[in-house]
Amino acid sequence: MKLTSPPRPVSRYLTLASVLTFLLLLSSSIPAFSADEHGLIDGHSHDEIKRGERFFKGLLPFNFKGPSCVSCHNMTPTDTLNWNPSAYAIAVKYADRDFESFKASIEQPVGNMLTKVHAGINIEDEDLKTVKAYLDNMAMTGPKPVKPSINNLLIFLFFGMLITWALLELIFFRKIKYRFIPVLVLLGSLGYQGKVVSEEAIRLGRSPGYAPDQPIKFSHKVHAGENGIDCKYCHHTAESSKSAGIPAMNLCMNCHVLIREGTNSGKFEIAKIVDAVENQKPIQWVRLHNLPDHVFFSHAQHVGVAKIDCQKCHGEVQEMSIMKQSADLSMGWCVNCHRETDVKFKENGYYETYAKMHEEMEIGDLQAVKAQDIGANDCMRCHY
């Protein structure tokens, strides 16, 4: 009979560390809520809120065959534009309204798509009250945050443990006959971790593909694409200012004073603009493109002087329902653009002082002027 040796102390410590890490992650994922002395949360019992959540997610009633609420009203941001109002948006809108108003919005929703979907829905008042209880609680506590994936972190920590084992094996244990095995494990694990650290360090301050959830479902595809609205109509300071500017709500009302119902979104989203104007509450848009504080960039120089199209930096905006960051906005990306881009040199008053270059272009000695030829890549242009 072959006897197995008891686990080494190091293995015990690693197992204990893994268990403690798991318990820490588990405890951080448990949501907290505050209740009054009667066990009520914002006037609703915990059981009502949980039952309303199950109704909203389609888990109750068991014999219900229609689409669930969450199938149309998403609870977390999505990468495609869902024109129906989100669960949190509904919760905020009806938090201060009575049950009858909430019930009326279910029976007679605004928007063509919701009208068709809600036509066959029949929910008892008692069940619908639990749904409102769940939404009222959501309006108070906020939507559940999207939990970040920890798969890459766990892999990184796993290779860290392999490095620890390889070092202990080489220095203390010396149980493996072939010494090259722990050496290979050590080198491979260090190589992987070095690669991860390098890539993550390069990504610092860069966020290509960033597409935050905005307070209003504004589609550039609808406005700039289908309706052909010029970018500078809304971002009217792009030609003369450092920033392109965020349009004021009054500018939105130039059109929406008449257009009160969208083809896709109904009245829900446009009503947010009207409410902001009437109550003088600014819309809290989430900034999309950010540069470090030590970098100077001027839209006036690029749009007003260089006549660069918005799509050059921001991508095919007219095709985006959800606006996202297209380029990584790194220094290398800017420098390469300055090296490759021809400046609109002729008949441009800004460049009249470059007399010698104009003469060379007239006689054919100079075919084109790149941005870097007139100092665009000088360090002090961006980092003064």
Image: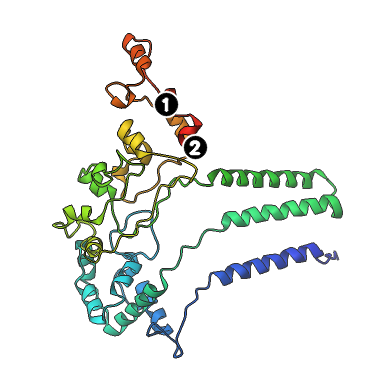
Which corner quadrant holds the N terminus?
bottom right
Q: Secondary structure at mark 1?
A: helix
The residue at 42%/73% (across/down) is: 141
Left or right, 143 with respect to 125, comes to right
Is the residue marked by circle 2 packed among few (<14), some (14-19), or many (20+) residues within 10 Å? few
Give the quarter of the image for residue 7: bottom right
Report which quarter residue 62 is drawn in: bottom left
Q: Amino acid at mark 1?
A: Glu
Q: From the viewer's perspective, tell me whether residue 171 is left or right of residue 128.
A: right
Decide which of tag 1 and tag 2 comes sooner along the chain. Answer: 1
Give x and y (percent) for residue 10: 79, 62
In depth, the one of 170 and 95 nearer the eye is 95
Q: Is residue 367 visible?
A: no
The residue to which callout 2 is attached is: 383
Query: Of circles 1 and 2, which is in front?
Result: 2
Q: Position of residue 153 (x, y in %)?
A: 60, 56
Tell me the kind of residue under disc 2: His
Point out residue 336 in the picture as x, y percentages from the top left corner: 46, 30
Q: Measured from the top left, where is residue 301 in percent x and y?
A: 35, 34
Mark 1 neighbour class, 10 Å CA radius: few under 14, some 14 to 19, many 20 or more: few
Label 1 vs label 2: CA separation?
A: 21 Å
Viewer-proximal residue, 31 or 362? 362
Labelled disc at residue 287: none
Verify CB contact (< 8 Å) between mark 1 and mark 2. no
Q: Which residue is mark 1?
A: 340
Q: Residue at x 84, y 65 (%)?
A: 5
Q: Secondary structure at mark 2?
A: loop
